[in-house]
Each structure stands twice: as structure tokens, then as C-alpha cells.
């Protein structure tokens, strides 16, 4: 049946929502080679610059040499190797929990964990701007999904009050750092609400882990509420420079997850080289080098925000290394991105369904490996281009 999907693809093109892949040659640095040209990379989640760090590469190579390329099975069959156990111990220690479980990706963690915790008859309270993988996990669980307006704790309280007589379990789930806005969940209020209403609180800290908090333990450390979070989920592929994800929680919860989370049970486990990369990344995050890298990222974010905010961009409530530059329409956003790329600056446009309709934006991210002067030059270029396009 040739051609039955062409109309759909044409419709995406007409709405400015058609996507295509851009290929980077070489490794993931502050400058990358994109389709044959050198560009400044301003849309990577490699916040600490660990993705091509010599220490991580060496750890991966040593593990490859010693343990081989793959694991040959899922975790519960014969795919658990020493490094899985070592990494889980290390993550539990890092997050200050009794248990931790490694998942194959953040997407796999959220779609596995949420349906393991709640099901039919239960309730999920979910911030409207939570990551797509959380939404998918909620839908898979078949629990009743109650979405509250972004960071609106009054609305959440109202929903909790309205459902307080419900017999089922209640799960509150939120991004720690919101992935497309760079603002933070109100974790201290969420902790009080979950206590008051007997709910379980899960925080997806994909963008906070390694970056926020004096020790890099993430948004909960930054907010001073680590012990109040029941389930800490984080990824190993962003600030930690490698690949994979984890859940840190009580032993009771990690035991349940290894018995119930389908993405954990029915998927081949992460290979040794990837696990070794994560262990090496934790070495750095916990060292003085990690602290220096975190300080650099935050300084860089401040530099960019302090230039682009006053230049007229709506950077929303960004408090982190993720800085949205609000445009509105999808087509205008992509044109803005394209013109910047022509000038050697790579900032990807973000459109629906990643963000709500009418809120398309450039999502600018800074890395510790950027040079201050490169960021200043890029910010000037972004402002000049934004002005020319009538965005500011
Ligand atoms: C990136 C991301 C994920 C998915 O993690 P992967 O390891 O890339 O699959 C989950 N949640 C949030 C908030 C994210 O930003």
C-alpha cells in the first residue's frame, strides 16, 4: 500500500511540525561538526561535558576489555553482571537511599516504574509540563490521570482534597527540573502535600542529577528535601555523559520494581562499558572537579540569561542550565533555528507535541565545556537574529 502515509507527512510539513535528523560527526564537544561544518553546540544535555571526557572513555574501554561487549540477557535471567551490582550500590549511596535499580533509559524507567506502582483504581497527580515518558508511563498504568497546571500547588491541593476519600493509591509525579523550561518543581510544597494526603512522591531528575546541589545529587538536594522524596529517578545519559537511568528508593520499592517493572524485566540489560562509564561519571560528579564543572555551568547560564533577558527574550522562569527562548509559532521557531545555524550556532527548535501548541521555542542549553567568550558571541548573534525576525 504505497503512499498511505504521505498525506500525514505533508500535513506535518504544512504545520511546520515535520522533523528530521541532524547528524554530528566526531565526538560531542562544545563545538561539533554538523553536516560538514563547525558549529557551537547549544542544545545538548551533556551539561558537564562528560560525554567525551578521557576518564569516562578509559573506564569504558577497560570494562569492554575485561567484561566484553554485551550481557546476553535481561537482568533477571543471566544479564546481571558485577558492574550492575556495583553501580546500584554506588547510586544508592550517592542518593542516600537503601536501594537503587538501573534501567536501560529514562524512557524505560518512567514507562516501567509508574505502572508498577499504580494501576486501575489508583490516582496519579501529574504536572502538565512533565516529560512525555512520564505521561506514557501514566497512560500505560491505567490509573486515573489528574493533570494540574504547571507548578500550581493550589490546584494540586484542590485535586487532592477532591479525591481524599478515594481508596486507591495516590502518586504525585513531577520533573525536578522541567526539561523544556529550566524551572524547578516546588519540591518542599510537594513533600508537604504528599505527607498531608498520604501520597507517594516520585521525582524525575533527568536534568538536575549531576548539576544541581552542592554535591550534584540534584533538585532534591538543591531544595533540601531529599528524605521527603519516595522515588528518585534520574538519567545517566545527560549530565553523567553516558547512557541509562536509575531509580533510587527504599528496598521495598526497588524490590517491587524488579518484580513488576516490565521495562526492567523484559529487556536486555545495559552492557558493561556503559555501566563503567556511569561509575566513572559518578567519580567525577563527587569530586572537586565535579563541583567546579557545576559552578561553571551555572555561571554560564547566568551569563546567557543576563544577556538575552534584557535583550527582550522571554526566558520564562529558567533557573538552570536550560534556557528557553520563547517564539510561539512552530514555523517561526524553525526559521530562527535555521538562521542561527547558518551563522554557526546550533540551537534546536522545540515544537508540539514536545511543548504545548503556541509555545514553540528555542531551547538553549549551556555546558561546562563552553568558553565564556563563545557564549557571549552566540548571545549577541541570537539577539541580532531575533530582532531581525521580529521575535524581540
Ligand atoms: C530525557 C528525559 C527522560 C528520558 O531519559 P532517556 O534516558 O533519554 O530515555 C525522562 N525524563 C525527562 C524529564 C527527560 O528530560
Image: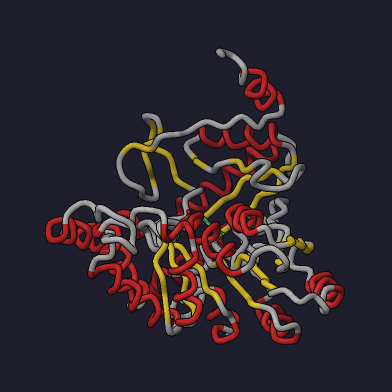
Closer-to-camera residue (51/83):
83
Left or right of residue 387: residue 57: left
250 vs 152, nearest the viewer: 250
Q: Is residue 65 left or right of residue 109?
A: left
Residue appearing at x 49%, y 73% in the figure: 256
Residue 5: name its quadrant. top right
Q: Residue furthest top?
A: 2
From the top left corner, tell me how far across and down residue 220 is, in percent: 56, 78
Q: Residue 12: x and y, percent?
A: 66, 27
Q: Nearer the viewer, residue 345 or 51?
A: 51
Q: Quadrant of residue 88?
A: bottom left
Question: Measuring 56% from the left and 14% from the top, which residue is drawn there?
Answer: 1
For image coordinates 54% across by 75% down, the residue present is 231
Q: Quadrant of the C terminus?
A: top right
> Where is residue 225 shown, x and y percent of the image?
59, 84
- Viewer can see residue 364: yes
- Look at the picture and state if 334 lies above or below 127: above
Amino acid at each position: 500500500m504505497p503512499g498511505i502515509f504521505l498525506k500525514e507527512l505533508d500535513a506535518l510539513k504544512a504545520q511546520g511540525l515535520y522533523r528530521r535528523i541532524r547528524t554530528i560527526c566526531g565526538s560531542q564537544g562544545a563545538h561539533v561538526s554538523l553536516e560538514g561544518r563547525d558549529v557551537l553546540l547549544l542544545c545538548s544535555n551533556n551539561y558537564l561535558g562528560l560525554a567525551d571526557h578521557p576518564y569516562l572513555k578509559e573506564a569504558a574501554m577497560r570494562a569492554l576489555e575485561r567484561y566484553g561487549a554485551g550481557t546476553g540477557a535481561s537482568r533477571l535471567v543471566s544479564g546481571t553482571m558485577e558492574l550492575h551490582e556495583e553501580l546500584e550500590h554506588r547510586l544508592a549511596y550517592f542518593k542516600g537511599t537503601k536501594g537503587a535499580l538501573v534501567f536501560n533509559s529514562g524512557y524505560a524507567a518512567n514507562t516501567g516504574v509508574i505502572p508498577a506502582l499504580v494501576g486501575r483504581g489508583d490516582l496519579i497527580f501529574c504536572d502538565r509540563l512533565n516529560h512525555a515518558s512520564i505521561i506514557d508511563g501514566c497512560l500505560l498504568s491505567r490509573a486515573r490521570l489528574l493533570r494540574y497546571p504547571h507548578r500550581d500547588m493550589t490546584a494540586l491541593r484542590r485535586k487532592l482534597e477532591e479525591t481524599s476519600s478515594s481508596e486507591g493509591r495516590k502518586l504525585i509525579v513531577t520533573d525536578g527540573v522541567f526539561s523544556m523550561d529550566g524551572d524547578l518543581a516546588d519540591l518542599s510544597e510537594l513533600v508537604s502535600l504528599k505527607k498531608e494526603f498520604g501520597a507517594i512522591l516520585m521525582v524525575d531528575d533527568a536534568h538536575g542529577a549531576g548539576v544541581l546541589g552542592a554535591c550534584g545529587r540534584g533538585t532534591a538536594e538543591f531544595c533540601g528535601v531529599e528524605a521527603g522524596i519516595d522515588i528518585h529517578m534520574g538519567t545517566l545519559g545527560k549530565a553523567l555523559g553516558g547512557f541509562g537511568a536509575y531509580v533510587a528508593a527504599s528496598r521495598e520499592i526497588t524490590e517491587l520494581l524488579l518484580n513488576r517493572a516490565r521495562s526492567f524485566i523484559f529487556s536486555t540489560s545495559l552492557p558493561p562499558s556503559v555501566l563503567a562509564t556511569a561509575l566513572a561519571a559518578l567519580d567525577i560528579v563527587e569530586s572537586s572537579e565535579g563541583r567546579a564543572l557545576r559552578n561553571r555551568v551555572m555561571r554560564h547560564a547566568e551569563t546567557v540569561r543576563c544577556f538575552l533577558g534584557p535583550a527582550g527574550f522571554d526566558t520564562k522562569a529558567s533557573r538552570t542550565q536550560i534556557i528557553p527562548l520563547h517564539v510561539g509559532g512552530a514555523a517561526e521557531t524553525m526559521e530562527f533555528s535555521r538562521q542561527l545555524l547558518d551563522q554557526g550556532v546550533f540551537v534546536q527548535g522545540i515544537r508540539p507535541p514536545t511543548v504545548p501548541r503556541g509555545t514553540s521555542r528555542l531551547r538553549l542549553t549551556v555546558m561546562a565545556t563552553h568558553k565564556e567568550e563563545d557564549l557571549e558571541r552566540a548571545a549577541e548573534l541570537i539577539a541580532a537574529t531575533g530582532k531581525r525576525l521580529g521575535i524581540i
